[in-house]
Every structure is written in C-alpha cells, then in structure tokens.
Amino acid sequence: MGVIQWLLVATSTTVNFFSSHDAISPTSSLVNCTSDSNVTSVVDLVNCLQTYVVPSGYYTEASYNAAQPTAEEAKDWALAVQALLDVDSEQGCTTENVVPVGIRDIYSASTFQQGKDSSPCCVLYEHTVDDGVYAKGWGFMLTRMPAEATTSLHLSAPHPHYDLHTPEQAGSVFSNVGARSLVVAGRKRTAWLGGQSPCIRGGRKAKYYATDPAHNDVRSFLFIRVFRLLKRAFYFFAQKEPFNLALVALKDWQDAQGGCEPSRSCAYIQFHGKGPSTCSTDQVFLSGGFSKPSQTVKTVVRFLILSARFFCRELVRRQ
C-alpha cells in the first residue's frame, strides 16, 4: 500500500469546456488522432482524442446501459490497461500486443511520438465513433515506455469538457516530467442526466451523476423507477464506470511492482477544476484513494510526516 493514495490538483475555474479541435463529422467511423499530421504533441493528441468525448445529456437509460462494458469486456478493459503499462520498445505498442481480442472491435493501441528527439508513448484509445462521439466512452490512456519513464507518476483527468483545460494540463505534465501514465475519461460528467450517483447524491445546488467518476466510485447503477406514483428510485448493480475500472487496474499493476512509495518518485495525481470561490486558497487536496476510512487516516498522517521531514531537510540544505 503506497503512502500517497491520491493527490487531487485543482485549477482555478470549472466551466463547460469543449475542445478547440475541429468538430468531427457525424459520418466519421474511425478515430485517427495518432496518425493525424496536425497532431504533433501530447497536448495535441489529448485535444484530438477528447473531441469525441460523450457530451452532456447524450445518454438515455437504454443507451447508457448499452455503452457500459459487460463483465467480460470489463475484464478485457482492465487487462488492456495493464498490458499498456507492460509494453516496451522491443515488444512494440500494437493492438495485437495490448488489446484483448474481446474488445479489439472497440479499442486500438499504437505508438505516438512528439518530435524526433522525444521519447515515444503508447496510446490506448477507442477507435469507433457514433454520431461524432465515442460509441462506448470508456476513456483513453497514454503510457511512456518503461525505459523512458523518469518517474512513476500516474496522472488522470476525470472531467473532460467540464473542468477547464484539465486534460491538456495533465497531458502537458505527462509530457514534461517523464510521467508513467495518463488516463482521461471518455464521458462528460453530465453525459447521463437521468441517473444520479448512488455514492454522493448532492443537494439542490449540486447534483452528481452516475457518469461522474469522481463522485461515483462505488458502482454505476441502472436507474429504474419502480413506483412511479411515489417516484422512488431503485438501483441495481452493474459494472463500475470504466474510468474507475482503469484506475483500479492501474493501481493493481503498480502494487505488483512493489507499491507506490514517494521515495520511488511514485504518486497518483488527478486534475480537477473548481470555481474561484471554492476553497480559493487551496490548490492540492489529499484523498484516501481506494482505501477504507481507517487506512485513509493513516495514509494522511504518514504523508504529512514524510512531507515535514522533506521540508526540514530542504531548509537545512539551503541555509
């Protein structure tokens, strides 16, 4: 169990943001961002891939359920995430080496390199679109080849098209600090307005939806009204949001490598946006990640102790 479970980095504003990349025609059927000559950097790539993110209010109950992975697809999705982390230059970043057969009709993997002198990265992305958006919306992922990664930082952005520029910011950090991985959600947090998160319901001013992976970390649910007169809502278990499935698979992979310790330059960092009046003096938040509450307390205390020791050493060194 790593000392740092999750760091949440918040930028200054949260708005309904859409990529500046050219709009995709409804007749498009394949995503070709990795071979687009106009895509010359990781940030360009992230911008291109998030063009297809499932927009607000897109899903009905039926279409949301159809887009969710089946039990077998969820296993294959997790295997693809871990295979992407295992890819090296000798093996090669190809669909055959990364993507299980069961989801190859949905996902592809390919190498992307920004410029001649930069290190290549491996990209896992959904290649099918329907009406100009991802047919499934499970998200996309970039990893750096093991020999090229200078840290074990794992970055993620759960709110594309909503939290201002957070996927691009995460992509820029990934590109410039030698991070190990980047995961970006494939659905806007409000993609299904009919299903509220069973984890955090929110109130009158704030609503959290089942398609918001930052506020629905248990399971996504099938929303069925059983008693129309009483307007009661019942939820039945289905697969988790695919973005969260990817993060669980990623953490399992890192744990198998010996865990995620700060001494190994390892951390999980998630990018969020927030309103200017929301926690205006705070930019970084600690999370317990997937731990139980008791473990969360221990995690925070250990992190604070290590941080204090680090700053004390730095002060002594600079005197």
Image: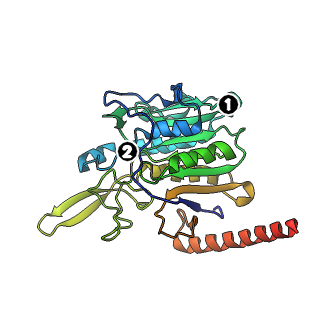
> Is 310 positioned to the left or the right of 54 in the image?
right
Instruction: Tell which of 85 and 149 is nearer to you.
Output: 149
Point out the frontmost of discs 2 and 1.
1
Which residue is painted at 52% across and 60% down in the image?
12
Which residue is painted at 64% across and 45% down in the image?
180
Q: Which residue is mark 1?
A: 89
User: Three-letter amino acid code at disc 2?
Assistant: Pro
Where, quadrant-wise, is the N terminus in this rendering?
bottom right
Q: Which residue is mark 2?
A: 69
Q: Quadrant of residue 111?
A: top right
User: Three-letter amino acid code at disc 1?
Assistant: Ser
Give the x, y percent position of residue 256: 64, 51
Give the x, y percent position of residue 43: 56, 40
Query: Can residue 23 be seen by looking at this rendering?
Result: yes
Give the x, y percent position of residue 187: 39, 47
Q: Earlier in the sequence, mark 2 or mark 1?
A: 2
Disc 1 secondary structure class: loop
